Amino acid sequence: MREAEKTFISGLREKLVEDKIIDESQLDPDFAKEIVKYGGKDVMTCLQCGNCTGVCPISLKIDYKTRSIIKFCQFGLKKFTLETRWVCATCYRCYEHCPADINPAEVMIALRHIAIREGVIPPFIKMAATNLVKYGQSVKPDPEIERVRKELELGDVPSRDQEYAKVVREINLLVRSTGYDRLIGIESEVKS
Amino acid sequence: MNSSELLGGNEVKRTPTEANGNSSGPRIGVFICHCGSNIAGTVDTSKVREAAEKLPGVVAAKENKYTCSDLGQDEIIAAIKENKVERVVVAACSPRMHEPTFRSCIQEAGLNPYLLQMVNLREQCSWVHSREKDKATEKAIDLVRMGVAKAAKLVPLEAREVPVEQSSLVIGGGVAGIQAALDLAQMGFKVYLVESEPSIGGRMAQLDKTFPTGDCAICILAPKMVELARHPNITLLSYSEVEEVTGFIGSYEVKVRRKARYVVEKKCVGCGVCADSCPVKVDNEFDMGFGKRKAIYVPFPQAVPLKYTIDKDNCIHFKTGKCKACVKACANEAIDHEMEDEIVELKVGTIICATGFDTYVPMKRGVYKYWEYQNVITGLELERLLNASGPTGGHLIRPSDEKTPKRVAFIQCVGSRNKKIGVNYCSRVCCMYSMKNAQIIKEHEPDTEIAVYYNDIRAFGKGFEELYHRVREEYGIEFIRGRPAKLSEDPETNSITIRAEETLLNKITERQFDLIVLATGLQPSEGGKRIGKILSLSLSPDGFFMEAHPKLRPVDTAIDGIYLAGCAQGPKDIPDSVAQAKAAAASAASIMAGKNVKIEPLTALIDESLCVGCGLCEEMCPYGAPEVFESDKGTKAKIVEALCHGCGTCAAACPQKAITANQFTDEQIASEIVSALGGIGVTAEKAKKAAKKAEEA
């Protein structure tokens, strides 16, 4: 049973399988407009040709179908698109091939914006943001990384630099003044 | 207290007759149309009527449910007679719809037909402001006031009649051009058919079979080609180009360049001995480069006229001055290497433009490796490979090793429906020709495995859906819904793997094929673009020629006396091309049968006393109507009325203000502007204030 479900609804969206039937209450008719607001192109012009999926390096490796995400957007199935995994590397190959001249990569970015604002925030975003306000870099300083850097003669990580504390303060100021901390729920981490 | 006191000191209560009858201007009738609910549903027409009644000069203002109906027209006629109306304002739809209707209506009542002013309350008011009813009513009142102001300044004009030449020029000898020429010739008109290639037949002659019935293309076309060549009313000018077209409906003057074919047409009997003796072998364009021809050649065996042509670029004699093998071989002494191009001048009444299409050449980077992989071919190339008189005698081979392919894939929508390459339209024939070709391949080699990669199937014509069913049910052709993403070639076998998402399965598939056929779309032909410039035809956004009206005048162009047929106007299949050709022939005939044609008086006029002969009008005019000439008073310009469309470009450009456009004179336009700014009794000061206020807002 599970295998068949995976075949038809790409396995990513177990919720959809649970719901079985999509009724009108689940549709958001203005979703396409919202995507445009957050910088995506109009998904309604998509012809569903599947060229984007075929050229997507991610689609080849895991169960992630660019075309079907665009179809969910067209349909207005917001809640499913918000749970899309953040795997798009924005390589823009889909854009290069798209005959409808949509930029699916930018639609993915718009979907991330919307997801954050709807409170669907993947844990790694909070983690990276916390690192940013703490250390001034999205990856936590790690002795192992520093050792490899030394081997490759890449110099110290900037957070080791005393002067860098000033930069970190500025990052904190920016994060606080733009409201980014409140948006993703890391207010407690931000130094005032 | 009497009413005049209520209205204030100087105001006197005005009755319609007093207000309007005493002015010296013409008596105006205003007729407001409801257009069912198209106008009245948004605009409060009774308010508009009340406002119109108060306008200066208006002696009658009436509302009608449908002014264009017999009842509505009768009311206009009655008002002209009873109220002695001298100028008519009809506030209804666009003048493009019903201006001719109302012109003939007021003419019936004895008025000059050009004393009519249309006010567009539908397209330019009610339809666009359906959500703001009050504002729409206000705008409608403004528009009517402007119309009345202009109507007061209208002057009578007279249409002119010119004789029509009883002959027609058909440009392009494809199936559309052939059909149009035959139809006109049958009706008794003289026809000149100009074709740039050595033979008529066009693209249809290249095809193997036609969809959906599977008729052999050349078998059904050849009899028409022969009939055309033999028809006494048709002069066939093959291997010729239209160089210049001047004149106007009824009397076009055309210069045609007859390219030197280095073979005297009258002497050549088409025996082919010359070609047998010719030592040069080159790719035959007609076979899309798959077959070979000689430097002296006919493109295909059924060519009409069956006269040989020397390809100057490849002929040894033109390169070295030697050879002349063909001259020695020809018993009729038909070959003349000294022949030169010849200019033929024609005079025709009408022109039919049937310049056809070119197929999209997938040469851009990323378009399915057409230039890179030998086994990727286009649909038209496949037609030649399947054609019994083609380079392989109808045996399908793949180019890399000339073996019969066992697995064939068709890729649809190449060069159509693709915004990336600026082609937004559907080419309309690719779905069906791919299915038809798939069927033919299956008939030749029943064990061939065939898949069609498609986006959407367009099987809209008569018998098309049935073919779609047939190829799936009887021939087992597989349809995969998805646009291929990547083609990769096996370097040893030259077979090609297609990676594509099967969108209906939501799975990425990879499959190997021996031959890939790209269903290339249709594009406006290069020759057609040149002709378009010569004829000053306008283009649709897709680059094909634009018809005068997409629904009601689909074969006419914006230029009177020039008609469109076939793929020059947009992608079409054969029956549609033939139908349009017949329609174009009928339209051209309807002009020529009338012997004379009326020319609208809405043209530009040049006041010679003001003209300094600068020639700016000649430069600006899109129709070539102004002509600069030398007179005893110096250099002056004049307007060739039959060419003028009354667009007013020259009038706007003229630095001397020597040009006026009839019915759009400065005085008439200014009266509209003044009334738009201030309404009744506007003064210069008030108008200035209003303009300032508008600027501030």
Image: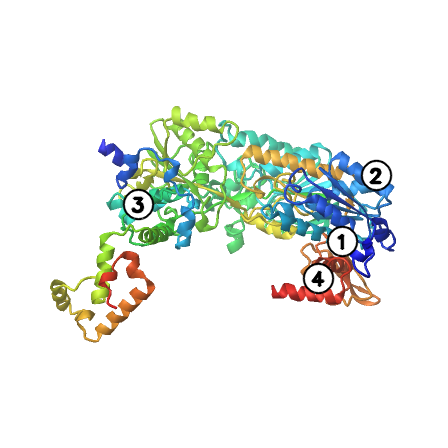
Residue located at (56% from left, 29% from top)? B220
Q: Chain of mark 1?
A: B
Mark 2 or mark 4, which is nearer the start of the sequence?
Answer: 2
Which residue is tagged 3?
A: B488
Q: Give the class, few, some or many, for how many residues have Cα within 10 Å of label 4's Cα (few <14, many ≥20).
A: some
The disc at residue B28 is none
Residue A140 coordinates in the image, percent (x, y): 18, 62
Residues under labels 4 and 3: Cα distance?
60 Å
Q: Is residue A106 left or right of residue B18?
A: left
Choose between B674 and A68: the one closer to the eye: B674
Which residue is tagged 1?
A: B603
In what element is the residue under mark 4?
Answer: helix
Q: Both on one chain, marks 4 and 2? A: yes
Residues under labels 4 and 2: Cα distance?
39 Å
Q: Chain of mark 4?
A: B
Which residue is tagged 4?
A: B652
Mark 3 or mark 4, which is nearer the start of the sequence?
Answer: 3
Is there a contact, CB below 8 Å, between mark 4 and mark 1? Answer: no
Q: Both on one chain, marks 2 and 3? A: yes
Q: Both on one chain, marks 2 and 1? A: yes
Choose between B317 and B248: the one closer to the eye: B248
Q: Give the class, few, some or many, for how many residues have Cα within 10 Å of label 1's Cα (few <14, many ≥20).
A: many
